[in-house]
Image (cartoon, helix red, strand yellow):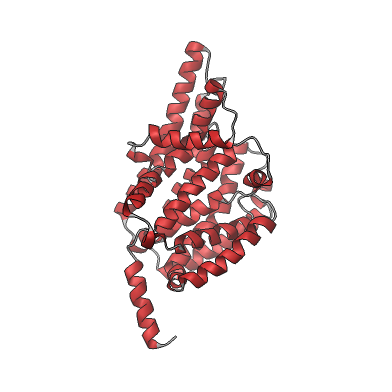
Amino acid sequence: MSEYNKTKMSQFIKSKKNERNVGLQIFRMLLCFWVLLFHCLKRFKSIAFIYIKLKKFHVPSFFFISFFYFYPIIKERNSFKMKSRLERLFIPFTIWPIIIWLFNNILYLTFKISMFNRTFQLEELIIQLITGRKFFIQLWFLFNLIFLSIFFFIFSFFTESIFFTFMIFIGIICYIFQHNRFIYNILENYKDCITNSVGHLVSSFPIAITSLAINKINIILYLEYHRYKSISIILSILPFLFIYGPPNTYDGLDINIFSFFAFLLFYLLPINKYLNKNFKNIIYIMTNYTNGIYCLHIIIYTFLRKEFKCSSSLIDCFIIYLLYFIIFRNKNFYQL
């Protein structure tokens, strides 16, 4: 690359540093809806809906987004932003299980009705708050975000070269262990929530460190400099990964690769340039609540199914998605 092009590239990168990416906000909205479909849609009448159950790319994609934006915090060792991040994650992680535990037990003991048809023991609440899995199992995702954020922030006080060398080494070991089900084999005699919590944590680590690394070395900004060529290449790769990649779980390499390229695609889409400011604001408002809908969609779904006999169709899933935003539109602590 010539000196002129290097200078031009450097100016481009600096100009993009603080720009909020609308494409990734839209990606988060779509991922939340995919999570909702994955958990709630029961009528699989076509190959498309069957793939919803097989292609579990939503969680790796969330990790790519979350830790991509986490890199500046560990680079600057910014304790204020770290505290703010942990609050946004920790509040729904702890408050909602306690509310559900109390609400369910009071209803059942008083009226003999509840969404779960039984009471929860105190032991179950403690396990839920420690592992993120018991009666509110989807909160394992927030547990992983909290644990890995703290882990990375502690080790960020080493030099960056030591930090990334060490973390990439751990990431490779984690992937090898998870791919060979080493963790599950060790913990198979323990309670299921403990086994799965450790397993998900191990499988999440390589994704998180990969996302930190691509932000550090500015790969995505170099791709954005050649935006349309990059988008064309990614669009030729994604359908192949989605259609022909073997169905797998969160630790599957094909799922992680698909999530990585999907993340790149939505980042590179030139939406910031062409989308109306009012539409951008609507997207920003809605994506403030992705954490909340991720936590609570199962509760809304269970309530609608029991009280209104919802059939769990695609339309019902849209209703659940929109109903959450209507009910909780003024609750700021759901932000991710």
Position of 140 relative to 326 (above/below): below
Question: Could you say which is closer to the camera, residue 220 or residue 132?
Answer: 220
Quarter assignment of residue 116: top right
Question: Could you say which is closer to the camera, residue 185 or residue 233?
Answer: 233
Residue 148 seen in the current view: no
Residue 234, horizontal then vertical, whole percent: 56, 66
127 sits left or right of 76 in the view: right
Badge count: 0
Residue for point 47% across, 44% down: 142
Position of 238 relative to 124 (above/below): below
Residue 13 seen in the current view: yes
210 sits left or right of 225 in the view: right
Residue for point 45% across, 22% down: 103
Question: Could you say which is closer to the camera, residue 147 or residue 334?
Answer: 334
Residue 23, horizontal then vertical, whole percent: 43, 57
Residue 333, horizontal then vertical, whole percent: 35, 40
12 sits left or right of 167 in the view: left
The quadrant of the picture occupied by the N terminus is bottom left
Residue 59, horizontal then vertical, whole percent: 54, 49
Residue furthest to the top in view is 111
Residue for point 38% across, 34% down: 328
Residue furthest to the left in view is 80
